[in-house]
Image (cartoon, helix red, strand yellow):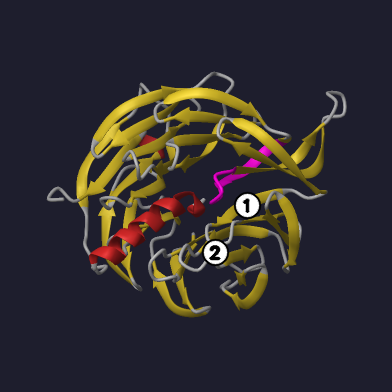
Amino acid sequence: MSSKQLLGWLVTLWLLSISGCQSVPRIPEVITTIPLLPRAGNPSVVTTNIHTGYTYVLCGFQHIAVFQKEQLLDLIPLESQDTPYDLTVDKEHNRLYVLNRYDDGVIVVQETQKVVTLSLAGRKPKDIAIASNGYVYVVSGHSKISADQGSIVEGNVTIISGTQVSGVIPLGRTIPTQVVADPLHNAVYVGGMDEKVVVIEDLQITARIPITASVKVMDVNPQTGDIYILDTHGYLYQVQQQEIVATLWVAKEYSVPQNMQVHPTTGDVYLVNTGGEVLVTRDMQIVAQIPLESGALKMDIDPLTGNVYVANYRKDNVSVIYDTKVITTIQVGWYPYGIGVNPTNGWVYVSNTNDSTVTILGYPDN
């Protein structure tokens, strides 16, 4: 989820601070749209490695497409038993971790080469994050037992170091679905189907934070380390070093936002409702309700320009938000699902799932 680009954001923020640059609104244009079929499957999740400049796009169960600027560099083939679901990048070591939901494993890719598939302690993994100590945390909600008994509900966090499994943290009878890392305090937060968020420090559970419902999505402010938690009842929590410091109800007419991301430069929280609205909170107060097309879901944020990009899958376009205003809408391909920003140059990669293309937005004069 959004925590997957924190290291890149932090590097970018440092570069901006030493150069004296200011965030200014700038509108990208469509550079190209690249077809992937018949060579690859339908594209979905997007993530970027700030060190190499590679942007990875998950393509069905068949390939991972690797882009650099407007070029499709490579297609990493996957095995027939692989069932990839999510991607995250260890930018320090140029490793890509691919979450295999139904095969209970994690594929490790070094730049563009698949090197190993790791077996997890639990079944049906849900989310993956990389902490500031370099460990990779994978949450899964079922324990493996005998073949005749199937599995039981019992959460686990599998800890990966490099290309090896280094440990497992049992969570008890719960189904964890989200994990996010605080880059400043070396803490990891795990949320799931029960009404608690588990805090892990130094590979040990140190706290369980009570909330009112199951966790829907979590994110972190990379400048402060504050954790933001959205639950299924529509409550937004701000957590500072394991303590809830503020709560805000953000549901509207029984409709709870489906996605959330913290702006890496302003600290504002953007919450997307698929009914066609983006809420913006500042200091845990709603400061804007931005109307969008119905079908808004996935988003990403560019720390260079400050632009917030929201993919509207029902209207086949991307809304560009600056601060609290929509500054333009850009037509892309059929059913844009995944979206990711390369923070080194502000280019945006949109995976158009239903026509198996990737639309690239950028700045030709960069």
- Residue beneath the point at 75% across and 55% down: 205
* Pointer 1 or 2: first along the chain: 1
Local secondary structure at mark 2: loop
Whether residue 95 appears in this view of the structure is yes
Residue 47 spot, x, y in % from top left: 42, 43
Q: In front: mark 1 or mark 2?
A: 1
The stretch drawn in magenta includes residue 133: yes
Question: Can you tell which quarter of the image residue 210 is in?
Answer: bottom right
Question: Can you tell which quarter of the image residue 124 is in?
Answer: top right
Compare residues 174 and 256 and report the one nearer the observer: 174
Local secondary structure at mark 1: strand
Q: Which portion, as a residue range, is magenta?
A: 123-135
Question: Can you tell which quarter of the image residue 137 is in?
Answer: top right
Residue 321 spot, x, y in % from top left: 33, 65
Query: 23 left or right of 4?
Result: left
Compare residues 210 and 45 and report the one nearer the observer: 210
In contact (CB < 8 Å): disc 1 and disc 2? no
The residue where tag 1 is placed is: 178
| Mark number displayed over residue 257 | 2
Tag 2: Cα neighbours inside 10 Å, few (<14), some, or many (≥20)? many
The relative height of residue 342 versus residue 211 in the rendered view (above or below) is above
Amino acid marked by disc 1: Gln
- Residue beneath the point at 47% across and 29% down: 109
The stretch drawn in magenta includes residue 113: no
Residue 68 spot, x, y in % from top left: 28, 36
The relative height of residue 250 versus residue 45 in the rendered view (above or below) is below
Amino acid marked by disc 2: Pro
Compare residues 252 and 339 and report the one nearer the observer: 339
